[in-house]
């Protein structure tokens, strides 16, 4: 009997040891999985941070450089030897901006605050007064991105296609709907605004969030872009 008891005890200890080894192996596997996930997440965050840095430090400045070079091109005399060179500069900067967007598109966050600050700075630099009113409310990342892109596109059109002395940008939140209105007073009311690719892209972005984009041209030369998107906090 003592021998059977000893054998049973050894079998029990062996079983417990095997079970402990199995549990240890499972936990080690889980730990490796968690470590791999942590590395992947850290890499993703690093890519996102890189995208934000590229956008904030490079893309916005290229955008400003494009507008300034286009202005210099328009101011140059038709027979000036500088016009072909300026045209090449404009095209090169546009291509560089497109390359930056393509590199960072998959992980870049567009900053609404940054685009509003850029809009005020560039409009005032060109002699256009800019008034901005933004509601103090939390907006979802997707909504903020659409609004930021709309601000950039609208300001670009103001500088390229109008003689505005005043541009107003207003963001309000009412009944769960975010409304962005961008207006300027420099449009010729006799020339109907066109629906270019830029406006179509804005409409597609807003529609993806169950929103809409509309335009209004007043007889007194005021042109408005209105974006309405359901708030997603």
Image (spheres, helix red, strand yellow):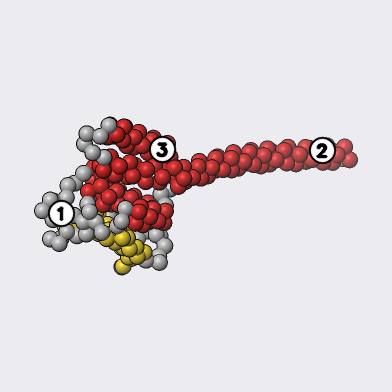
**Which of the labelled discs sits on residue 116, or is there none?**
none
**How packed is label 3: few (under 14 Cα within 10 Å), some, or many (20 or more)?**
some
Q: Is residue 55 left or right of residue 159?
A: right
Nearest the camera: 30 or 51?
51
Answer yes or no: is residue 78 visible.
yes
Question: Count the marks: how many?
Answer: 3
**How packed is label 1: few (under 14 Cα within 10 Å), some, or many (20 or more)?**
some
Q: Which residue is mark 3?
A: 100
Residue in the picture at 54% in, 42% down: 46
Q: Residue furthest left?
A: 190
- The image shows residue 15 at horizontal and vertical percentages of 74, 39
Q: Quadrant of residue 218?
A: bottom left
Quadrant where the image shows the C terminus: bottom left
Q: Is residue 169 above or below residue 142?
A: below
- The image shows residue 56 at horizontal and vertical percentages of 45, 47
Earlier-in-chain disc, 3 versus 2: 2
The Cα atoms of the two marked residues, 3 and 1, are separated by 34 Å
Q: Which callout, 3 or 2, points to the residue nearer the camera?
A: 3
Q: Secondary structure at mark 1?
A: loop
Q: Which residue is mark 1?
A: 188
Q: Residue furthest right?
A: 2
The Cα atoms of the two marked residues, 3 and 2, are separated by 68 Å
Q: Secondary structure at mark 3?
A: helix
Q: Is residue 64 above or below residue 98?
A: below
């Amino acid at each position: 009997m003592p021998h059977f008891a000893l054998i049973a005890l050894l079998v029990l200890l062996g079983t417990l040891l095997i079970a402990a080894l199995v549990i240890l192996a499972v936990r080690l596997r889980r730990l490796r999985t968690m470590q791999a996930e942590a590395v992947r997440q850290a890499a993703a965050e690093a890519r996102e941070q890189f995208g934000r840095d590229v956008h904030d430090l490079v893309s916005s400045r290229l955008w400003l450089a494009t507008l300034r070079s286009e202005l210099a091109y328009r101011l140059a005399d038709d027979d000036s030897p500088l016009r072909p060179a300026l045209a090449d500069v404009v095209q090169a900067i546009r291509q560089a901006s497109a390359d930056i967007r393509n590199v960072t598109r998959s992980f870049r966050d567009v900053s609404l605050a940054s685009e509003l600050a850029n809009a005020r700075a560039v409009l005032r630099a060109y002699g256009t007064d800019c008034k901005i009113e933004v509601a103090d409310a939390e907006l979802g990342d997707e909504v903020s991105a659409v609004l930021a892109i709309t601000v950039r596109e609208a300001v670009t059109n103001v500088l390229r296609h109008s003689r505005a002395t005043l541009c107003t940008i207003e963001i309000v939140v009412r009944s769960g709907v975010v409304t962005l209105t961008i207006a300027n007073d420099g449009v010729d009311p006799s020339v109907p605004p066109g629906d270019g690719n830029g406006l179509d892209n804005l409409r597609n972005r807003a529609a993806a969030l169950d929103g809409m984009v509309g335009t209004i041209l007043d007889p007194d030369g005021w042109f408005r872009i209105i974006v309405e998107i359901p708030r997603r906090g």
